[in-house]
Image (cartoon, grey):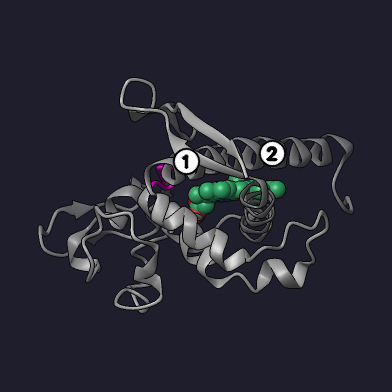
Amino acid sequence: MREGLSRVEVIDELLLFIVAGCETTGTALAWFIYFMSKNPRVQAKIKAELGDNKQNRVSVEQIESLTYLDCVIQELFRFLPPVVGTTRTLTIDDQLPGSGIQLHKGDETFISFYNLARDKRCWKIDPDLFYPERFQGEDKDHHPYASIPFGGHRRCIGQDLARFELKAIIVKLMQHVTFGDGGDQVNAGGYIQKMTVIPKHIGVAITFD
Ligand code: HEM
């Protein structure tokens, strides 16, 4: 019996990491910039949590202590999951609850993260609002499957890295710049749906603090 992975399998895994890891995290960052330009109140709170720390080196402990930023990132992933959903193949016959629609073993199902995260039954505060504070209060104990941007069972292997990368980049950005709304003509939002949900029209004003 062969032991370990072949050279080709190792290269395949590395390529998958790059494909699965780059566009997703880059897209999340682009949406962050867009939402900051549209939500100056949230941006100001992130900066207030950072205090006047403008040091070049920020420790892991400092990054981890930013709990409001955690809520912003959680809200970012809920409001616009970079990956729209995932698929699963049924291993048994089953029925959808409510509608009673019959599903068969072997059927391929699509689970939409976006629809779950916008389902009004799962949230106390209107899910169509971009409101990070929901995770500190009313929606703290939301249904565990209401927001699953990294998948459910057998979820993304890179989720902790992605969250940490994003947090570290956002800290550096928020230490030095403020994003402002570039106006409806250029900062209209919208999206293009490819492998990820990419923002379409982002035009922000950048002020160096
Ligand atoms: C914002 C960033 C990211 C998002 C939103 C994201 C999302 C996802 C989702 C939804 C899945 C499918 C999970 C499922 O079907 O249940 C997945 C799988 C995966 N992700 Fe991520 N991901 C991100 C970043 C990363 C990073 C940084 C890496 C690696 C360094 C990575 C590596 C992978 C791999 C290897 C898989 C498994 C693919 C497979 O099963 O064939 N992801 N990711």
Looking at the picture, how far across and down is residue 34, in whole percent? 45, 38
Q: Is the residue indicated by label 1 positioned so its CB lies within 8 Å of ligand 1?
A: no
Looking at the picture, how far across and down is residue 122, in whole percent? 24, 67
Q: Which mark sits nearer the N-terminus, 1 or 2?
A: 2
Looking at the picture, how far across and down is residue 169, in whole percent? 67, 49
Q: Is the residue indicated by label 2 positioned so its CB lies within 8 Å of ligand 1?
A: yes
Considering the image in quadrants, where does the C terminus appear?
Answer: top right
Left or right of residue 171, residue 103 in this image? left
Q: Secondary structure at mark 2?
A: helix
Give the residue number, with chain letter if any, for mark 1.
31
* Pointer 2 local density, CA inside 10 Å: few below 14, some 14–19, many at least 20: few
> Residue at the spot x=33%, y=29% of the render?
190
User: Residue flagged by tag 1: what amino acid is it?
Assistant: Trp
Q: Main secondary structure of the magenta part?
A: loop
Residue 112 visible (yes or no): no
120, above or below 37, in the image:
below
User: Residue flagged by tag 2: what amino acid is it?
Assistant: Leu
Find the magenta span and give its range: 80-85
